[in-house]
Amino acid sequence: MKKLSPFDRYALYQRAVQSPEVDCQFISDAYRDSRSKRPHDMREDFCGTFALCCEWVRRNRHNRAFGIDLDGEPLQYGREHNLAKLRTEPASRVHIQQGSVLTSRMPLVDVVVAMNFSYYIFKSRLILRRYFKRALQGLRHDGIFVLDCFGGKDCQEANQEYTSLGHFTYYWDQVRFDPVTNEALFYIHFKRRGEKRRERVFTYDWRMWTIPEIRETLLEAGFKRTFVYWEGTTRSGDGDGNFKRAEKGEECDGWIAYVVGEK
């Protein structure tokens, strides 16, 4: 019987959850929509293993990436497994800092991004506005701020979904939702072939921010305009992966969208 490799939760997370190539393309397209030119300097807040930063510098020799995260463990993983895969020159254009997105200082950039719903960790509008102000301060005069968000009635009740990804299965488990506070608790579980399911590999205790709340708070923080990018649908009613600006959405059990703020 073939021996299983050591369990690597970050490798499984990156495979199951992240799509750096897709995200980088969306970031570039959104910036061109707003500014009619290419962005080159990108800052990834809550960057974790900063796979997005590494993909960003890989795409263009003029690109630079800056990443901030409070947790040193995923940052070290990123250095050993993502940054180490880059050649010397593009690797020199990745700049990572351990610290808080509320207080850390980095060079001004064209785009600040907060992906994977990471800012949902902020549960009060006061703190969310404070974070958005910090993002605004980190942008050049023609910069944009890109956030993803999700929702739908499926997020307002306990439920679990799973996806088979070859040698392992990824489980997204919502265990509760509080309609008074709009807070929800989620877990990620993994099951590798030939092993028992590994429970609660990652935990997320979030407030489910709505699109109107996000847009209003961006304006309160000083952004001039905001845009929503809504996903198109296939004939079967599933998301097609194409996001376009929209001021009206569709009623969906579950949806993912982007919100962009212009400085």
Image (cartoon, grey):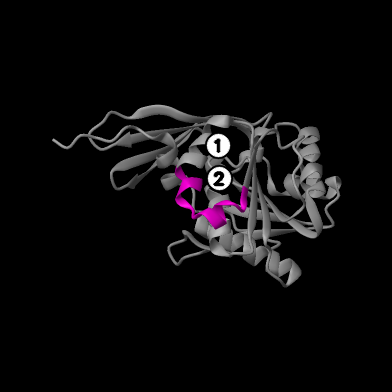
Point 66% across, 64% down: residue: 30
Q: Amino acid at mark 2?
A: Phe
| Residue occupied by mark 2 | 50
- Check disc 1 and report its element: helix, strand or loop: helix
Q: Amino acid at mark 1?
A: Leu
Point 78% across, 35% down: residue: 125
- Check disc 2 and report its element: helix, strand or loop: loop
Q: Is residue 154 above or below residue 219?
A: above
201 sits left or right of 66 in the view: left
Q: Is residue 147 magenta?
A: no
Q: Is residue 114 above or below residue 31?
A: above
Contact, CB < 8 Å: mark 1 with mark 2? yes
Q: Which mark is residue 24?
A: none
Q: Quadrant of residue 232?
A: bottom right
Magenta region, residue range: 81-94
Q: Quadrant of residue 142?
A: bottom right
Closer-to-camera residue (79/14): 79
Check disc 1: other Cα within 10 Å, few if <14, some if 14-19, many if 20+. many
Q: Is residue 92 magenta?
A: yes
> Residue 38 appears at what percent x and percent y?
68, 68
Q: Quadrant of residue 64?
A: bottom right
18 sits left or right of 53 in the view: left
| Residue occupied by mark 1 | 75
Closer-to-camera residue (123/4): 4
Q: Is residue 58 above or below residue 49?
A: below
Point 64% across, 64% down: residue: 62
Q: Quadrant of the N terminus?
A: top left
Q: Quadrant of the C terminus?
A: bottom right
Distance of mark 1 from mark 2, alpha carbons?
7 Å
> Residue 175 appears at what percent x and percent y?
49, 29
